[in-house]
């Protein structure tokens, strides 16, 4: 039985702020989100050179707790959470038994034993929650979707630490390494101060109540932090070689195909392990590569990747004229035989093809806090 | 509020045309450049290429998206604005000063199908 539901676009707690700032708004993952406020280039450079902030309140927060929470999370998550300490954050995926990806996510080990926070992509919240609940049957743990109760702001860039300390007064920021977090309070409510991000720069993600989120956003804005939209979020993460679910990871694109095998640990059991081990052993047809082309023309998602004789060997998943590097670059899913570094490949852009070659996917040298 | 120049013709796909005898000078409107955002690349045709009214003759690329350029008239390209190859941002800075191609029209009556400034203003609803 199925019923058709026409879902209205959701708004984050910061929607009115975006409108007040004159942001260009567009639907994304079921939410009406800001694409840009001033220009993608200006916002991109603010994050690379100073500090910018993003409304990422659309992201999902799912809590898993109970005597078997660790056992369970380790079963659905590709990375290894045994021995991973409270206050740490771990990146990885949830996979289908066939190796495709349900979602990529962050796992936070909370300070109470057997408590975990899973931060998932906005577009996948309902799917993930259903998947996690289904897989949790038989485990002694509870699963709660608290996504609507949390707002989230990402403060990113070389001046992020200074901003969080000086504007918001959180001296704890200085003590956090990359992928570490602590709990602080804002107006008596919990605030998760997490040294994480999706830009290739140092930065923090602040999770707290929607009311607090609005107030913090205004304080950061008054302090001169550049508001940044999803447009530059994509150009920044792309340059840093970070995948976007739906483009570089999907039910059809496994972590092994995407070159993210380091986030899969095989000395434990998890859903999808057998399929991923098989792919790792060489049993896969496609791999994700970076391609740099020798022209200013821009490779876009969906454009064909070819050999010199016109044989199609793959497709572009994300591409830009890189703002930081002034080069036309893309991620592409190509036949495994064409995936070695320096392999010459051609990208078809409208009527012409442009020569390029396979390069490392991390186009931009990231600047994370050690 | 987007700038609209009197005396030009406009297409519904946001190109402008300035008529100089049997030559149509073609660019994109101020409204179009604003909608595109930072333009990073202009895909130009070559001189002597044939263009057809209503068909694509090139493209503008912004950071985020690619947008086809649609020819408002039919004819032969007599000149392209090669300055835009190295300085595509000029389209953002001055949409009406940055022509893209000049076309020797094969059927000037096609101009009658284009909008005048008032018609274009109504189209973009500003």
Image (tube, rainbow, N blue to C red):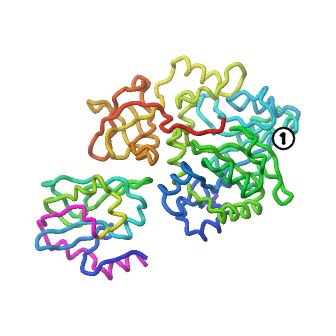
Q: Which of A274 and B17 is in front in this view?
A: B17
Callout 1: residue from which chain? A
Tell me residue B83's x, y (percent). 25, 57
A195 left or right of A346 in image: right
Residue bearing mark 1: A142
Q: Nearer the viewer, residue A77 or B43?
A: B43
Tell me residue A290's x, y (percent). 44, 34
What is the magenta range?
Answer: B97-126
Under circle 1, the secondary element is: strand
Tell me residue A126's x, y (percent). 68, 48
A142 left or right of A236 in image: right
Q: In this view, does A40 lie above or below A246?
A: below
Residue B117: within the magenta?
A: yes
Quadrant location of the C terminus of chain B in the rendered image: bottom left
Q: In this view, does A197 lie above or below A274?
A: below
Name the residue at 58% across, 32% down. A100
Tell me residue A173's x, y (percent). 74, 46
């Amino acid at each position: 039985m199925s019923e058709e539901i026409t879902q209205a676009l959701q708004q984050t707690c910061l929607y009115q702020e975006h409108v007040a700032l004159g942001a260009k708004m567009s639907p994304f993952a079921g939410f009406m989100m800001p694409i840009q406020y001033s220009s993608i280039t200006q916002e991109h450079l603010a994050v690379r050179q100073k500090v910018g902030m993003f409304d990422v309140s659309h992201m999902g927060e799912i809590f898993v707790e109970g005597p078997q929470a660790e056992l369970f999370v380790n079963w659905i998550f590709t990375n290894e959470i045994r021995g991973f300490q409270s206050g740490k954050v771990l990146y990885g995926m949830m996979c289908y038994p066939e190796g495709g990806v349900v979602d990529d996510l962050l796992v936070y080990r909370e300070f109470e034993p057997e408590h975990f926070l899973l931060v998932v992509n906005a577009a996948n919240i309902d799917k993930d929650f259903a998947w996690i609940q289904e897989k949790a049957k038989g485990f002694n743990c509870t699963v709660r979707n608290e996504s609507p109760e949390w707002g989230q702001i990402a403060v990113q860039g070389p001046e992020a630490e200074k901003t969080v300390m000086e504007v918001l007064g959180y001296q704890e920021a200085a003590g956090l390494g990359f992928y570490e977090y602590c709990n602080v309070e804002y107006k008596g409510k919990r605030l998760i101060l997490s040294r994480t991000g999706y830009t290739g720069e140092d930065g923090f993600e602040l999770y707290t109540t929607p009311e607090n989120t609005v107030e913090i956003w205004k304080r950061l804005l008054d302090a001169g932090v550049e508001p940044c939209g999803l447009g530059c979020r994509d150009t920044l993460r792309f340059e840093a070689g970070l995948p976007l679910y739906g483009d570089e990871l999907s039910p059809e694109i496994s972590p092994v195909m995407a070159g993210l095998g380091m986030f899969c640990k095989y000395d434990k059991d998890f859903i999808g392990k057998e399929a991923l081990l098989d792919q790792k052993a060489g049993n896969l047809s496609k791999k994700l590569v970076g391609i740099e082309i020798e022209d200013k023309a821009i490779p876009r998602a969906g454009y064909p990747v070819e050999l010199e004789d016109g044989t199609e060997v793959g497709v572009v998943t994300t591409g830009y004229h890189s703002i930081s590097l002034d080069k036309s670059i893309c991620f592409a899913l190509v036949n495994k035989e064409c995936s070695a570094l320096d392999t010459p490949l051609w990208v078809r852009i409208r009527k012409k093809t442009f020569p390029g070659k396979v390069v490392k996917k991390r186009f931009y040298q990231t600047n994370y806090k050690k | 509020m987007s700038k609209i120049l009197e005396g030009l013709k406009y297409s519904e796909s946001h190109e402008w045309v300035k008529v100089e005898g049997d030559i149509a000078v073609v660019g994109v409107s101020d409204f179009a450049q604003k909608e595109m955002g930072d333009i990073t690349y202009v895909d130009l045709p070559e001189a002597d290429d044939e263009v057809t009214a209503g068909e694509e003759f090139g493209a503008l690329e912004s950071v985020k998206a690619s947008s086809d350029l649609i020819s408002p008239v039919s004819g032969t390209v007599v000149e392209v604005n090669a300055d835009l190859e190295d300085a595509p941002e000029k389209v953002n800075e001055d949409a009406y000063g940055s022509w893209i191609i000049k076309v020797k029209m094969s059927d000037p009556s096609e101009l009658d199908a284009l909008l005048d400034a008032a018609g274009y203003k109504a189209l973009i609803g500003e």
